Amino acid sequence: MSTVTPLAERPSVRKTNENWVRAKRMKALYLMMLVPMILLFTFHYVPMYGIMVAFKKFSPGLGIWNSPWNHFEHFKGLFHDFLFTRALRNTLIISILKLAISFPAPIVLAVLLNEIKNGMFKRVTQSISYLPHFMSWVILASMVGEVLSPQRGVVNYVIQLFGGQPINFLSDTHFFIPVLVLTDVWKEIGWGAIIYLAAISSINTDMYEAADVDGATRFKKMIHITVPSLVPMIVIMFILSLGNILNAGFDQILNLYNPMVYGVADIIDTYVYRRGIEQFQLDYATAVGLFKNVVGVALILSANAIIRRRSEHGIW
Amino acid sequence: MNKRIKVLLPVLLVGALSLSMVGCSSDNAAGNGSASTTDGNKASGLPAPGDFTNNLELKLSGSFTRGKIEDGNWVQKKLEDKFNIKIDNVKVDTFNKDQVQLMIASGDLPDTFAFTAASMTAQDYLDNGLTRTIPKDMIQKYAPRYTKMLDENPPGWEENLAPGTKDQYLQLLGYQGHTKSLIWAPTFRLDWLEKLGIKPPGDIKPVGTSGGKERIFFTEKAYTLEETENILKAFTLDDPDGNGKNDTYGLLPFNNNLSNWASTLMGAFGVASGYNLEENGKLTAAEISDKYKQFLKLMAKWNKEGLIDPEWTTIDVNKSWDKYLLGQTGYYPAQPAYVGMDDWTKGRAPQNLVVKDPNVKLLVTAPEIGADGQQGEGSFTPVNMLGDAFYISKKVTDEQLARILQIFDYINFDDDAIWTLYGDIGTHSNWEGTPEQSALKIKPEYPETEGNMGFYAYNFRTYDSKRASLLTSEDTMKLKNDFFGRQDVLDKMQIKPFKYDLMNQTKSSELNKKYSGQLDTIVSEFRMKAITGQIDIDKEWDKYVQSYLNNGGKEILAELDKAPKVSDLLNIK
């Protein structure tokens, strides 16, 4: 004779009940989470409706929904537009350079800061290093302009002291990209270092004590304990950075560039701004922006997959 | 349960998204944006002019709206009483491109608007379902002063007609009386010229008698380009400020607004920025003409010789005003109003330096003379004096339009309505000099525009000679009367386009919109690289012209070729 397990005693039902009980117990936390979820949904998912503009012949009077479809006209034309292909190339070049230089810079700073023994000096250095992060590029661009001015700038003053000719850094295609990368490092290095400093502070001090017993030097401890302990954090930050690879720095470039350097500095975002806002070609600009985002998502997915295959780290 | 949640969650998400879509689009769907025109004789069933029985609510903005208007302001109350309306103020800076373009994209526009910063044409607005047309009979019935202005400025009634109609207008026009003169003039540091022993090209006389204007001198003669070049060299190399340092420059251009800094210099080659011209029997754009190429070569030569401030590539016009204030520049272009120090020009070069430094003296001359005797600059308006655009929103009903036209006609064309700009004379403003012959100045205790008084808040940028004089100082007016606005000077020196689609007969404006982004980038990059010597103009020229033509220039020119000649348009009586 077969016995029938009561519904409430079936494992799946029991688990559901347990989950429900647990959820009820934490209802205050779920309630708190609701607010950011609503915000996230409202401001990050609902506006996605706007990407339809890329597929429409957008007319403000008709609105997004009623504007006629453009039959992928913009996407077909994208690669025939030399300004777009140039912007894409510039975006990739600037982003990769920033990734290669700006990404490791905070790690180096964090490791070096960790080695400073004088607490006051360490705090002051750290504060000074992350101050530029709080200033907008409008202000920083003016400062950069003054520092690099061919007439009044300190850099050109030094160049002239050594018998060189003043260089107009912001109008020279050879110098503009290095200026972009270096000023980006200057602005973000201190802020970026904070997360690594936090990770360093959570490293088990027993390891350092054991290394001391083994007679390891400070440099050896840094190389063999601090840096390896940071690897999971570095990997996560790297994958997150890849998602932003096509964000080459709109604010920075818009405030620093001029037509002389469009050839190397006009990125997708500045191009979208000019086409969309200044020339009111919103549908085309949206298509360009959408293309950028699709490439960004593809990059982050593939980077995560590659890293997962080679190590146990990764975001998901 | 888990499965059910997994299925339900995406469904809910999609549902919510769909709802939001419907929510976002319902308003727009209701407002069918097809290019509509109002039929025939609409004026017949509407109230008589002056009949304001029904109270109407109107959302008004004008050419000067900067979003600083306060509700219940002085002008608003008076207009509301006079026309029995309730005004809904627009609190957007219509000079800010970002704000304006986003407002247009939303489709939620004021009932009347004349955005300074927008880039759409009248046809674009109509095609996008944002504006309505204005019937001729309503204009004639409700805007008699405006009607008279169009009558007096042919082919006024033929301009801005909606395609396929003869009595429906895309917009209302303004009379640009304030631009009836040469706009730009070269200015030189006269104190430097004196120190260097260089004589002015003719008799000079001071622009004014006080406030620094006694140190600004004018001559209606001009230097030749060759003489200008020698002066710029002396300004750069001969230490004109006597400080023993090599820190002065001849010329201070900026990286935008070519039509400002190079207007008279290009004029010496017979070409005006943004206009087309006939060259070798063919229609061509200024920026790919041989004349423009010669202009670029001269600028490149000056740059190579160090006569141009090397920072010009990184500064725009506003920053150039600040830079001029350092006192290291010898030559700078200025409008007559700048040297006449009209109120609205405060802080602009070159008058900012005159105000700051009592030792500075300026010389204003006529535009430079080119190698073949060519002298002049592009005219502000391409054909006649009619220009700018005042639009009526698609949402406006005929009854509202009738009221709007009467308000528009009164505040912009009736001498009695000066109070909308300057308040009550004596109470809110005073004459700067001789009453009725000088500029009106708002008293310092009141905001010059908008705010709690509402001056200029609802007006359109239209100035007949009387209104133009209200914002022009006596000294500026004298400069214009003596030279810059004299008809024989204008006939000789104003450069107008060869062809112009004044009556919307071609698709050139549509093509311009489509290609202007690419073309502007091509032109500005080439110009700056050419002047700074990064490229060899002769070697790269053909490639540049080809690139211009291939990226839409050819289509635009072919379309523009169908437009009438400006000389023919000017002969229409």
Image (cartoon, coloured by chain):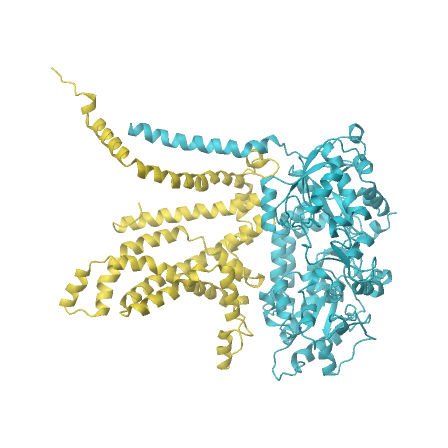
Chain colours: A yellow, B cyan
Above or below for B30 versus B532? above
Q: Can residue B161 be seen in this snapshot?
A: no
Question: From the viewer's perspective, is B228 left or right of A271?
Answer: right
Residue situated in front as seen by the camera: B15 or B417? B417
Q: Quadrant of residue A227?
A: bottom left
Residue situated in front as seen by the camera: B178 or B230? B178
Residue at 32%, 57% in the rendered image: A195
Q: Which quadrant: the N terminus of chain B?
A: top left
- Percent from the top left, x then y, of residue A249? 47, 56
- Percent from the top left, x then y, of residue B415? 82, 48
Residue at the top extreme? Answer: A1
Q: Quadrant of residue A129?
A: bottom left
Question: From the viewer's perspective, is B65 left or right of B49?
Answer: left
Residue at 31%, 54% in the rendered image: A235
- Percent from the top left, x then y, of residue A135? 46, 60
Q: How many marks?
A: 0
Residue situated in front as seen by the camera: B524 or B342? B342
Question: From the viewer's perspective, is A17 left or right of B228?
Answer: left
Residue at 31%, 68% in the rendered image: A120
Above or below for A74 versus A210? above
Residue at the right extreme? Answer: B573
Above or below for B438 versus B202? above
Q: Quadrant of residue A233?
A: bottom left
Residue at the left extreme? Answer: A1
- Percent from the top left, x then y, of residue B570? 84, 51
Question: From the viewer's perspective, is A213 left or right of B267?
Answer: left
Residue situated in front as seen by the camera: B397 or B124? B397
Q: Can residue B406 be seen in this snapshot?
A: yes
Residue at the bottom extreme? Answer: B244
